[in-house]
Image: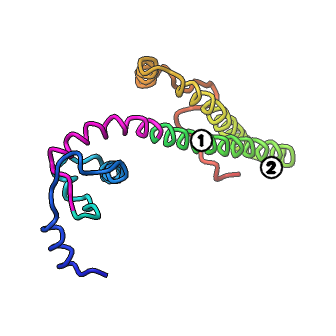
């Protein structure tokens, strides 16, 4: 293993050469170094790259030219990254909402079962409230996966209109059974 001081001396002794002294494999490794490090400017990239086997490092002017090429090369990769992250986020959101819908359905089943078995003992307000909350959760959760798919396929302009509508309260849940101050379910 090389000592840090030896490495420093090697880097100080590295030669800086012109544009045509590097093969495609080396240039590709510089591209990935640039991409993984957040696409830095040539001066910063110069300090990040390894010298070649002949102990040479491209100069900043060469790196500036390469970076222009790198930007074009990075565009399809950036698009793939965005698509992957978006798909993963959407999938996770749909899975979460599906679980919530199942929980809402379970709450409804529990409330109905409790009502059937305890007709004489139950506090009607509590049973009705549990049923209504279960229905609300299921309705909201089952509607959102469809909405997410529509949002994914919408234009930016359409999305901005929908956000504006939501901010103005147009998309608020309106139900005669759901009030602004839900009762506590503790008396079940």
Q: Quadrant of residue 135?
A: top right
Q: Residue at x 72, y 45 (%)?
A: 107
Residue 57 position, x and y percent, is: 20, 57
Q: Which residue is mark 1?
A: 91
73 left or right of 6?
right
Q: Residues within 10 Å of mark 2 (few under 14, many from 20)?
A: few
Query: What kind of element bears circle 1?
Result: helix
Determine which of the numbered discs, if any, sits on residue 121 in the image: 2
Instruction: Mark 1 vs mark 2: give the one in front.
Output: 1
Q: Residue at x 84, y 44 (%)?
A: 119
Query: What kind of element bears circle 2?
Result: loop
Q: Residue furthest right?
A: 117
181 left or right of 141?
left
188 left or right of 157?
right
Cα–Cα span, label 1 and label 2:
43 Å
Question: Which stretch is magenta?
Answer: 56-80
- The scheme the figure's colours follow is rainbow
Residue 94 position, x and y percent, is: 61, 39
Residue 7 drawn above or below residue 69: below
Q: Residue at x 37, y 38 (%)?
A: 73
181 left or right of 17?
right
Residue 12 drawn above or below residue 43: below
Q: Quadrant of residue 109?
A: top right
Decide which of 145, 56 is in the foreground and name it: 56
- Does the magenta run of residues contain 63? yes
Comes first in the chain, label 1 or label 2: 1
- Does the magenta run of residues contain 85? no
Decide which of 149, 79 is in the foreground and name it: 79
């Amino acid at each position: 293993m090389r000592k840090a001081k030896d490495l420093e001396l090697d880097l100080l002794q590295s030669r800086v050469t012109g544009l045509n002294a590097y093969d495609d494999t080396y240039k590709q490794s510089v591209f990935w170094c640039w991409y993984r490090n957040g696409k830095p400017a040539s001066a910063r990239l110069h300090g990040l790259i390894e010298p070649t086997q002949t102990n040479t490092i491209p100069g900043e002017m060469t790196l500036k030219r390469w970076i222009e090429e790198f930007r074009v090369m990075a565009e399809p990769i950036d698009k793939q990254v965005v698509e992957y992250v978006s798909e993963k986020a959407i999938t996770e959101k749909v899975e979460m909402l599906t679980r919530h819908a199942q929980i809402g359905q379970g709450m409804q089943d529990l409330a109905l079962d409790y009502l059937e078995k305890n007709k004489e003992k139950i506090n009607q307000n509590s049973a009705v409230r549990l049923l209504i909350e279960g229905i609300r959760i299921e309705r909201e959760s089952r509607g959102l996966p469809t909405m997410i798919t529509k949002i994914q396929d919408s234009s930016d302009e359409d999305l901005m209109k929908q956000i504006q509508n939501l901010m103005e309260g147009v998309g608020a849940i309106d139900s005669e059974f759901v009030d602004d101050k839900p009762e506590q379910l503790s008396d079940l």
